[in-house]
Structure formats: C-alpha cells, structure tokens
Image (spheres, rainbow, N blue to C red):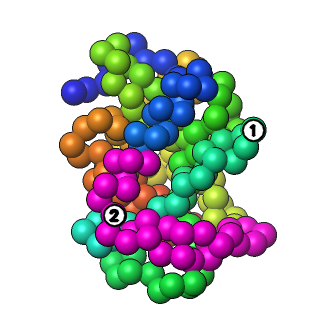
C-alpha cells in the first residue's frame, strides 16, 4: 500500500474517535504491562498509567482532553519503567477531537482506498531552544506530504501489519532529531 495524492484529513468527530480507538487498540495489543508513573512535561507532571511493550522497548499513554484533543504521549525504554517513576515524554501525537486544528500536531488522514493513516505536523517540543517544527522538517528522514495546504510527516497506515513498528520508528526519529539541538 502506498499513499497517493488523494488524501484528506478526517474532521468528523465520530470518524476521528474511531481512528483514535483503533490506534490505541493496535498499540495496546503489543504491550505487556500497564505501569503507574508520573509523566513529566514543561510546567509539571501527570500521574497516570502507561502501557509498555518489552518487545518494542516503547511506552505510551493516551487520554482524551475534553473539548480539545487526544493526548498520545510516547517514550522509549528497553526495561520496564519502575512503578511511580518520573518519565520524560519524547513525543506526542495529538489528533483533534473534531475538525481541522493546526494547533495540534497529530491527525488522521484517509486515502482513496479508505485506509486511515496517522500523520504529524512536525512541531516538536522539548523545553530547549532550537527544538521545533523547523528543526524537525530540516532533519526528518521519513516521508513528508502536503495535504490540504499543510505539511505532514507520514507515520503509517493504522491497519498495516507494520504499524506499531512505524510508530516506534517515528518516536526514535523524534529522539534523534531532538538530540541534534543539544
């Protein structure tokens, strides 16, 4: 399966919710453990329970932020994070709950065959000078497409067998790009 040019961003709340549920389901399937931790971010932290996959060395957390977006936070760890430890987020892939919102960095797009793809707008954070959208697109080694007048990094088709590996590769790529700013 390859992406053509006939792509459109999902904006319907029910379609986005369905895609988000499939996204989380695909990731949850490969996880071994749910671990209570503290997720650190600029300005604070959140007590939550992450899903961790030993096989992938990947953890994620997902929740809905009412009226705004789905918060999908990711990190890498070859060993299971300790219970109640503080974890730093490597990247977030946050689609809006509804509509077309350039303030959030994730989105679901649909191709002409009906496949749903996860994409990212490239704005990355990290609390350090120089980390942002420009650094991302100057250094991103994956596929980039313009869709509806916006630039997106393609992560993967959520129904593909390789989807979870594509998500991990994207998280690793973000980690690599952020390291360039140090």
Image quarter hosting the N terminus = top left
Q: Is residue 141 visible?
A: no
Q: Residue at coordinates 68% horizontally, 31% vertically from top-left?
A: 101
- On screen, 72 above or below 175? above
64 inside magenta stretch? no
- The image's mark for residue 31 is 2
Q: In the drawing, does residue 80 fall left or right of residue 147?
A: left
Q: Residue at coordinates 43% horizontally, 65% vertically from top-left?
A: 51
Image quarter hosting the C terminus = bottom right
Image quarter of residue 131: bottom right
- Secondary structure mostly seen in magenta is strand
25 inside magenta stretch? yes
| Residues shaded magenta | 24-52
Density class for disc 1 (Cα within 10 Å; few <14, some 14-19, many ≥20) is few
- On screen, 5 above or below 2? above
Looking at the rendered structure, the secondary structure element under dot 1 is loop
Q: Which residue occupies the extreme right position in the image?
A: 43
Q: In the drawing, does residue 87 fall left or right of residue 34?
A: right
Q: Position of residue 25 (x, y in %)?
A: 38, 47
Nearest to the observer: residue 103 or residue 85: 85
Looking at the rendered structure, the secondary structure element under dot 2 is loop
- The image's mark for residue 67 is 1
Nearest to the observer: residue 41 or residue 121: 41
Q: Is residue 118 visible?
A: yes
Q: Position of residue 88 (x, y in %)?
A: 57, 73
Cα separation, mark 1 vs mark 2, equals: 28 Å
Dot 1 and dot 2 residues touching (CB under 8 Å) = no
């Amino acid at each position: 399966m390859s992406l053509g040019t006939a792509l459109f961003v999902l904006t319907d709340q029910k379609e986005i919710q369905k895609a988000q549920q499939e996204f989380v389901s695909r990731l949850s399937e490969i996880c071994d453990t749910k671990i209570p931790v503290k997720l650190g971010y600029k300005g604070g932290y959140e007590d939550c329970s992450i899903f961790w996959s030993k096989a992938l060395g990947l953890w994620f957390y997902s929740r809905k932020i009412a009226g705004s977006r789905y918060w999908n936070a990711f990190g890498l760890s070859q060993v299971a994070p300790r219970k109640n430890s503080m974890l730093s987020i490597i990247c977030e892939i946050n689609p809006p709950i509804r509509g077309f919102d350039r303030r959030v960095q994730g989105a679901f797009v649909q191709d002409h065959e009906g496949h749903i793809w996860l994409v990212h707008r490239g704005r990355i954070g990290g609390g350090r000078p120089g980390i942002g959208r420009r650094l991302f697109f100057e250094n991103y080694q994956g596929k980039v497409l313009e869709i509806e007048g916006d630039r997106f990094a393609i992560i993967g088709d959520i129904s593909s067998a390789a989807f979870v590996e594509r998500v991990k590769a994207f998280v690793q790529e973000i980690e690599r790009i952020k390291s360039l700013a140090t």
